[in-house]
Amino acid sequence: KQELLKEMKGKETVTKDGRKIHLYANIGSVSDTAAALMNDAEGIGLFRSEFLYLESEDYPTENEQFLAYKTVAENMAGKKVIIRTLDIGADKQVGYFNLEKEENPALGYRAIRICLTREEIFKTQLRAILRASAFGNISVMFPMIISVEEVKRAKAILEEVKAELRTDGIAYKDIEIGVMIETPASVMISEELAEEVDFFSIGTNDLTQYTLAIDRQNPNLDTFYDPHHPAVLRMIQKTIENGHKGGAWVGICGELGADIELTETFLKMGVDELSVSPTFVLPVRDKVRSLHL
Ligand code: PEP
Ligand code: MG
């Protein structure tokens, strides 16, 4: 088995009949890039930026963030690195944010909702991401989106930050912008969302939680938490169709993307990218290369 996987290194992620997809890795820290590269990931499809905030006693500074993003971009040497903006709240609590205790944190004040109401935190992160973009192939994506207005507002703030950088004479690139599709609302409006962004990345962990109304944190519900549920699979299909209609490419970055029982299904749905934990990169490539669509 090890041998077989080694054989997959340096190979293209392509089916027997020539359908090629991008196969990226999910990372949650700068040091994870080593595992991504060792397993021959073709890029980073999800860089969970929360670690910067979780490991810190206070808000991470622009420069701390910049260095982290720049290091990852440089380590990946021109390969795509998709940085997800802050997804604090719900299961990821940080003391210095002084967030109020909530009855239903998974349905509460988190992620983009914090960023759009506490703009200074968001702007600091976007500035760090844009500055790092000059050193590699960076994209940005916004989590927990439920409306077109949120995306328009996030993009407007990104533009404000770009204008500030230009004034300061600091280099940046015009990076690709994506949204995570991880709420049923975002699936239902995916046709409109696609007009606003370059790509979608489907977060099946939260999408399953919110579609099935099952707390992903509660182990007593494991027997009910079924990411193969037809409702979840149809949501994925609809997202891919609508993304493509609007000219956005569509990937999957939730755990389900690594489920090789579904690789053929996802490819037939037209998925453009799968982003998986580093150790799943080669098994998924092996699976893709065994398929004839
Ligand atoms: C998801 O929800 O599927 C996802 C990839 O994001 P996270 O697991 O960090 O919530
Ligand atoms: Mg999520």
Image (cartoon, helix red, strand yellow):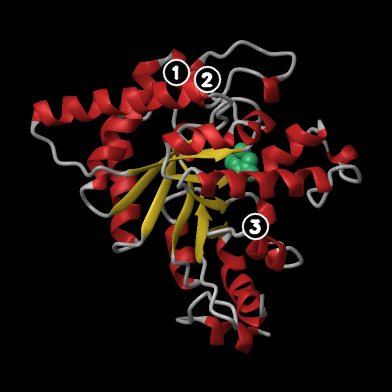
Q: Secondary structure at mark 1?
A: helix
Residue 79 located left or right of residue 209: left
Residue 70: x percent and y percent?
Answer: 28, 49
Name the residue type under label 3: Gly
Q: Are marks 1 and 2 in contact (CB under 8 Å)?
A: yes
* Quadrant in which the N terminus appears: bottom right
Q: Which residue is mark 3?
A: 257
What kind of element bears circle 2? helix
Which badge, 1 or 3, is on the more N-terminal residue?
A: 1
Disc 2 residue type (three-letter): Arg
Q: CA distance from mark 3 to mark 2?
A: 26 Å
**Residue at coordinates 53% horizontally, 54% vertically from top-left?**
26
Vertical placement of 23 versus 31: above or below?
below
Instruction: Give the residue drawn at x 33%, y 32%.
Output: 126
Quarter occupied by residue 225? top right
Give the class, few, some or many, for how many residues have Cα within 10 Å of label 3's Cα (few <14, many ≥20): many
The residue labelled by disc 1 is 116
Residue 113 is labelled as 2
Residue under the image location 62 percent in, 78 percent down: 286
Spatial CA distance of label 1 from label 2 is: 5 Å
Q: Amino acid at mark 1?
A: Leu
